[in-house]
Amino acid sequence: MINLKPEVIEQLERVLSSVEMLLPKAVKPINWSTCYAANWRRHSFSGFLEPVKMTDTTKLDELLGVDDQKAVMVNNTRQFLQGLPANNALLWGSRGTGKSSIVKALLNQYGEQGLRVIQVEKEDLIYISEIFTAVENQPYRFIMLCDDLTFEMGELTYKMLKSALDGSVYSAPENVLIYVTSNRRYLLPEYESDHIGGKYVKGELQQSEVQEEKSSLSDRFGLWVPFHVFTQERYLDAVKLCTERWSKQLGQEIPWNDDLERAAIKWANEKTKRCGRTAYQFSKNWVGKFLLK
């Protein structure tokens, strides 16, 4: 039996504690039969899937002004669920117009049919192959969601996502699709200088090399789904729907009148944006003040 000095034992304990901090966190496997959504959480040199309790109850028929976008995403997701060919999708456009809400509504609609969602932050895309490995043998269909995604040129995670979409080393298994939401169609900032270097070939203007590189990532998404600001009529319809939902939830009728409509328009003008998010925020303010009186 070896007798170690107290200072040696203390040093060994410090080393073991340090090593333990670097090891992946011990977590239970997710029970996907009851868990519909998860986040990827980074830990040390790797990470783990953390189950998420679903609290968003958004339904597809509650999303106004985006009927065409809903139809595209519903059809693509249904194809995916049935094991048919389906595309990765880039949902891009103006902020607050329902890009993320559509994905949440799809999960609420098709969760019982085997749809699951894993949300991944941009910085964690370097673990994309580990995420795929964690779910590739599961009997469910997974949407890997990257919400509000933008890149700067040269970022490592940009290349990782590009490879995954391109079907190379990091390609997704057959039970995983990638849905990305962004305010930018090309996911990268655009500058006036990007257009320098374009040239005509056989009478057609070819993009500059910078433009080609910036469009190369978004080109890998089979679906481009654009979202735009609402017309005033659509915006007011959204306000009315939000107000009715609050009335039903709180058991108190909120009358629709000219004062409410004028206040809603003024709110949108001050926000400089007519969209679903603005409508929801206004309805919370109006209903709260109305009931406080």
Image (cartoon, grey):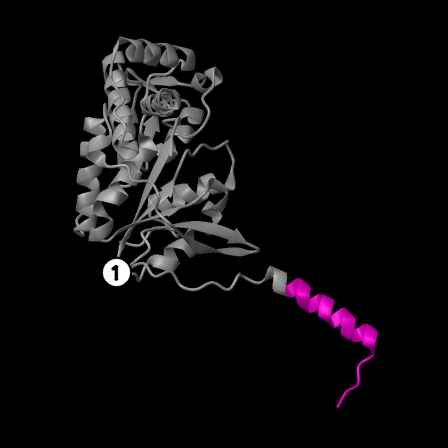
Q: Amino acid at mark 1?
A: Pro
Place of residue 291 in the rendered image (x, y in percent of width and height, measured from the top left): 36, 24
Indicate the position of residue 6 as horizontal and vertical percent values: 82, 76
Q: Quadrant of the C terminus?
A: top left
How many neighbours does mark 1 have within 10 angstroms: few (below 14), some (14-19), or many (20 or more)? Answer: few
Q: Is residue 28 above or below residue 230?
A: below
Task: Residue 139: tell me if it is visible.
Answer: yes
Residue at position x 45%, y 21% in the image: 190
Q: Which residues are magenta?
A: 1-19
Which of the 4 image quadrants contains residue 7? bottom right
Residue 117 lies in the magenta-colored region:
no
Q: Is residue 203 above or below residue 79?
A: above
Is 4 one of the magenta-colored residues?
yes
Q: What's the magenta bit mostly, secondary-structure-wise?
A: helix
Q: Is residue 202 above or below residue 172?
A: above
Percent position of residue 143, x then y: 31, 46
Residue, x 22% and y 35% (percent of image)?
60
| In this picture, residue 101 sits left or right of residue 214 | left
Q: Relative to the observer, which residue lies in front, 140 or 266?
A: 266
* Residue beneath disc 1: 139
Is residue 225 visible in the rendered structure shown here?
no
Secondary structure under tag 1 reads loop
